Image: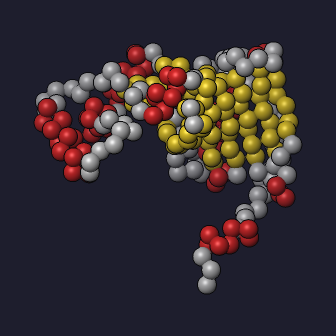
């Protein structure tokens, strides 16, 4: 019996969604609509693939969306992590929401900017205490000897912060993705998918508010 990986050429899922006609909303309103629909079908609708750049090329990982408004998409991380350092050196960023169960994806390109400290403080304050402690302990993306070392450092921090609030470390906070391109992708039969992309109306790659309809033009793309 062959393994599933040996059957990759024959592995496929047929899509059968309704035709996605010309969007009649600004990007922010359309994303909110799609997100709310995904929330009823997708286990973690706020899980998004974030791609950054270093001297060797692109690097991707999954993070969680934790804020959204007309300015863009907000997520949080360790600023000293690989992605934090990469974004500090080069703010160009790509984001993908892979909503497979909806036969949809949203593709975003933009520029990352460090979030206001007040936004980082506000989100850190509502994180579970264990996650707050973990953010203080973890040296994200750095080598560690073994799990025992990590656990020992975590346990020491639990003792250190016993009976008081856990502070947000200076090296931990948010990035906001300011968007200059956002595509809404809907799967269709025969791989003849519907793709509508919002690009800057002036042809630039400057970020714009997602609720400003005049800043965007929408174009259908071949699949």
The colour scheme used to paint the residues is secondary structure
Disc tally is 0
Residue 214 seen from this side:
yes
Q: Residue at horizontal 73%, vertical 35%?
A: 183
Q: Residue at x 30, y 24 (%)?
A: 169
* Residue toward you, 212 or 37: 212
Q: Is residue 80 left or right of residue 181?
A: left
Q: Nearer the viewer, residue 69 or 130?
A: 130
7 is higher (above) or lower (below) than 41: below
User: Which quarter of the rendered picture does the N terminus lie within?
Assistant: bottom right
Q: Position of residue 47 (x, y in %)?
A: 53, 43
Q: Can residue 68 be seen?
A: no
Asked whether 128 or 88 is in front, the reply is 88
Left or right of 83 in this view: 30: right
- The residue lying at 35 percent from left, 38 percent from top is 142
**Residue 164's spot in the image, x, y percent?**
16, 26
Residue 198 versus residue 22: which sits nearer the camera? 198
Task: Give the vertical position of 169 relative to 36 (above or below).
Answer: above
Quarter of the image where one finds residue 135: top left
Please report the residue visible at 62 percent of the width from the left and 42 percent of the height from the top.
97
């Amino acid at each position: 019996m062959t393994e599933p990986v040996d059957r990759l050429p024959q592995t496929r899922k047929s899509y059968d969604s309704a035709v996605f006609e010309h969007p009649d909303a600004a990007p922010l309103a359309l994303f909110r609509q799609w997100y709310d629909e995904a929330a009823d079908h997708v286990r973690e609708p706020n899980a998004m693939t974030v791609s950054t750049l270093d001297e060797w090329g692109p690097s991707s990982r999954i993070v969680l969306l934790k804020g959204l408004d007309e300015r863009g998409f907000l997520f949080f991380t360790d600023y000293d992590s690989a992605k934090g350092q990469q974004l500090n050196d080069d703010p160009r960023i790509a984001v993908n929401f892979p909503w497979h169960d909806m036969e949809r994806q949203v593709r975003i390109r933009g520029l990352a900017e460090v979030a206001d400290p007040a936004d980082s403080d506000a989100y850190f304050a509502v994180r579970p205490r264990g996650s707050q402690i973990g953010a203080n302990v973890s040296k994200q993306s750095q080598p560690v000897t073994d799990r025992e070392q990590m656990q020992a450092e975590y346990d020491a921090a639990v003792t250190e912060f016993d009976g008081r609030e856990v502070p947000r470390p200076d090296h931990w906070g948010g990035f906001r993705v300011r968007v200059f391109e956002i595509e809404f992708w809907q799967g269709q039969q025969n791989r003849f998918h519907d793709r509508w992309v919002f690009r800057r109306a002036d042809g630039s790659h400057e970020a714009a508010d997602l609720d400003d309809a005049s800043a965007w033009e929408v174009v259908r793309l071949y699949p």
